Amino acid sequence: SGTPQEFEQQMAQRLVEKDRTGLFLVVDNLQDADFATEEMLAHLLLHSNLLCVGLAYTYEQMGATREIKFGELSLIDKITLHPLTHQGVHIWLRSCLQWDPPAAFSGWLHQETEGLPASLRRSTPFIFHRSVLKKIGTSWALRPDFASLDLKSWLSRHRRPTPNNLPANIAIFIGRE
């Protein structure tokens, strides 16, 4: 039990039960997947008998220790979303905070998060708990020594694994400890 083929059979059965025609998988932080999960995904994408299989995933270059490839896939659309630019981070801050941040702050935040949207989102607790930014009336006050803070190290120490939301007991290699 627990082979990619068995997983495919179980998914096919669930698709019939749910009156669905295809399987769409969403994987956050694919670089954290174990090799059995990668094998299952590769099997579904390359060798599956299911009518339609889709995969959307995020892959955080910053935390990657290896590159994951699924070989040559046909009938596939691959979209690579690049990190936000310095200007993109500036616009994101302006939109979120309704405040035009100094270029030095948006540049620092871009450098520390590498422009990755998930890292920007995860940086919020750091920014507010360390009083990097404080709301004063309708504006924001910026801590003068913000550039000396090591947000990048904090982000790497506070990475949380994505919770597994697959049905229980489908296959032993998914979500194993």
Image (spheres, rainbow, N blue to C red):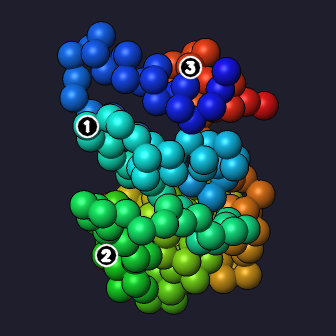
Mark before the other along the chain sequence, 3 or 1: 1
Amino acid type shown at disc 2 = Ile
The residue that disc 2 covers is: 91
The residue shown at (51%, 19%) is: 167
Please name which of the two marks, 1 or 2, marks the residue nearer to the observer. Answer: 1
Q: Residues within 10 Å of mark 1 (few under 14, many from 20)?
A: few
The residue that disc 3 covers is: 170
- Whether residue 26 is visible here, answered yes or no, is no
The Cα atoms of the two marked residues, 2 and 3, are separated by 43 Å
The Cα atoms of the two marked residues, 1 and 2, are separated by 42 Å
Question: For the residue labelled by badge 1, is the local secondary structure a helix, a strand or a loop?
Answer: loop
Front in this rendered view, residue 73 or 115: 73
Amino acid type shown at disc 1 = Leu
Question: Which image quarter: residue 174?
Answer: top right
Q: Position of residue 173 (x, y in %)?
A: 68, 32
The residue that disc 1 covers is: 51
Mark before the other along the chain sequence, 1 or 2: 1
The residue shown at (55%, 25%) is: 6
Q: Is residue 31 left or right of residue 88?
A: right
Question: For the residue labelled by badge 2, is the local secondary structure a helix, a strand or a loop?
Answer: helix
